[in-house]
Amino acid sequence: MSQTFSQITLHLLSGHIIDKMTQPAMMSWLEEEDNLASMQDYLSKMNRQVLLTSDKQGAYLGYMDINEKDSNKAIRQSFNKMSVLLYPLILWLRLVRGATDSSRPLQAGDMIKLSDLLASIESSKQLELQLADITAKLGRQTKEAKKQLNSLVEYLENEGYLHSVSSTGALYKATAKWSLLYDQLEYISKYQHLHPSKDEQDGAQDSYQNSFELSATDVNTPATSIDLNDDEIET
């Protein structure tokens, strides 16, 4: 078993996503058909498989048989954990859109310059209040906008959503973990409040794999219905 094979396997089994921009060697290895086939064969013995985000910017671990008792239980637990993580993440995405006047949400590979972001926030009372709200929901109590932003960015970096690309910590790149989040949001948007027939439900689960293995720190505010383009979030 090659060192790369072992490294990728352990990375995935630990619940981490492989990001194409920050881990190009790992992703390139997986993009080789023979390598991926050998990985899938090995993981299948544990009812696991490698899945790609819809934009192909990240790879993560999913279940092969979602109806198996232990797999189904783990999937439900993952979605429950995800529900309490979404709210501050979506608030952050809206904060960035408002501060940068972007026409779309943050995507994998986008660059964030903290000085520019902070300047926009400090020039808008609404954005300052949004920033304070997010940091409060994450249990990070500080009053200055600069400290709040640094604390929030530190959290997002620790959780794998941002990657520092400068020695001073002034420039960050969004990772493929946002790609996975958007895939998850799309799934929730389509199926969370619906009651499809068994055949429709099975088809939906098969098409999306219904297999997320997340690892993150819980926060206290759940979100059950989220729309990135709306001004309000239903909780």
Image (cartoon, helix red, strand yellow):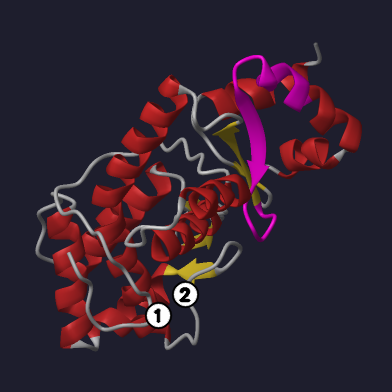
Disc 2 to disc 1, how far (Cα)? 6 Å
Q: Which residue is mark 2?
A: 105
Residue 113 percent coordinates (x, y)? 46, 70
Rendered position, 76 above or below 11: below
Tell me the residue at 14%/76% (across/down).
129
Q: Secondary structure at mark 2?
A: loop
Rendered position, 156 above or below 71: below
Q: Quadrant of residue 31?
A: top right
Mark drawn on residue 227: none
Towards the viewer: 69 or 179: 69
Say what amino acid the circle numbered 2 marks. Answer: Pro
Q: Quadrant of the N terminus?
A: top right
Which residues make up the magenta segment?
A: 39-57
Rendered position, 97 above or below 55: below
Tell me the residue at 21%/70% (across/down).
131
Q: Is residue 26 left or right of residue 140?
A: right
Residue 64 percent coordinates (x, y)? 61, 30
Q: Is residue 99 left or right of residue 221?
A: right
Q: Which residue is mark 1?
A: 97
Report if residue 97 is visible in the image: yes
Residue 55 percent coordinates (x, y)? 66, 61
Q: State yes or no: discs 2 and 1 in contact (Cβ < 8 Å).
A: yes
